[in-house]
Image: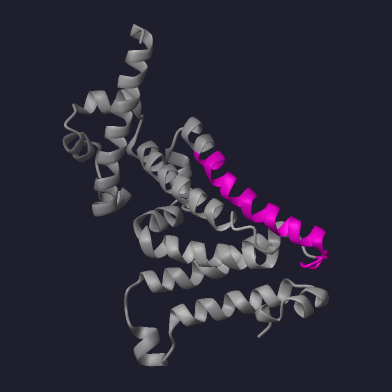
Amino acid sequence: MGIIERKEREKEHRREEIINAAEKVFFENGLQVATMDEIAEKAELGKSTLYLYYKSKEDLYLAVLMRGSQILYEVFEKALSSGEPTMKLVANLGEAYYDFFKEHRNYFRMFHFFENPQLHKQVSEEMMQLCSTSNGRIWNLIVELIQRGVREGVIQKNLDPMQVAVMLWSNSNGLMRQMDREDTYWKDKMGIDLEATLRLTNSLLLEAIMTDEAKAKYPEFVI
């Protein structure tokens, strides 16, 4: 291995160490409370070294967020690799996203803080572009699956695939954010099981986007 290659490997290793440290700090304290001093201490580096790799804690936040995006992308890819019918794959994505929520709740929370417009003003253009590309791969998986369903005649052709993707995504996000509050209001006061409600609404939405032919072919998706 040449000198240049070795230096690049060392630099990449240092970058991973910084992201690991930042992840721990963000998971424990959140973005608003976390500081670059804390991250530098956790990484056992000087703060000046930290700034050689990332211009701000907001840029570092996006670096950690992209790690979560990669995990979710791989979860979705696995859910789509079963070779099952398209409508079953759409249902699989909903289940896969819920599994991700249960197993990687801190990343799930980070995804939603990314929606904060104030964050977008504080990050570098380079990191924002990298993060948008990372998140875009996930959206492409969902939208392309919906488009396949339209081509196969199992999803109504008058529906916009992007709108369908947003609808399915928003339904899951809304209910999972309620679950993430970790209170018992819905269960104790209303007698509502949010997990069962999530599965019910996912099923209702699937039925709503299916063609009549698909409903006849796949009665298991009809409530």
Is residue 1 rendered to the left or right of residue 126?
Answer: left
Direction from residue 135 to residue 85 in the image, left or right: right
Secondary structure mostly seen in magenta is helix
Image position of 178 (left or right of 216): left
Figure check: 212 above or below 46: below
The colour mode here is one colour
Look at the picture and state if 166 lies above or below 56: below
| Residue at x-position 60% and y-position 68% | 91
The C terminus sits in image quarter: bottom right
- The spot of residue 14 in percent (x, y) is 28, 27
Task: Tell me how many marks there are.
Answer: 0
Give the residues in magenta: 131-158
- Seen from this angle, which residue lies furthest top? 3
Question: In the image shown, does 75 or 167 lie closer to the viewer?
Answer: 75
Please tell me in which quadrant of the rendered image residue 147 appears.
bottom right
Q: Is residue 142 magenta?
A: yes
Q: Nearer the viewer, residue 195 or 176?
A: 195
Quarter of the figure with residue 66: top left
Percent of width and height locating residue 178: 42, 73
Give percent across and percent down for residue 8: 36, 17
Q: Position of residue 185 (x, y in %)?
A: 35, 84
Q: Residue at x 53, y 77 (%)?
A: 199
Task: Answer left or right for 92 relative to 60.
Answer: right
Q: Quadrant of the N terminus?
A: top left
Task: Judge whether 65 appears above or below 200 on screen.
Answer: above
Q: Residue at x 37, y 57 (%)?
A: 104
Q: Nearer the viewer, residue 132 or 200?
A: 200
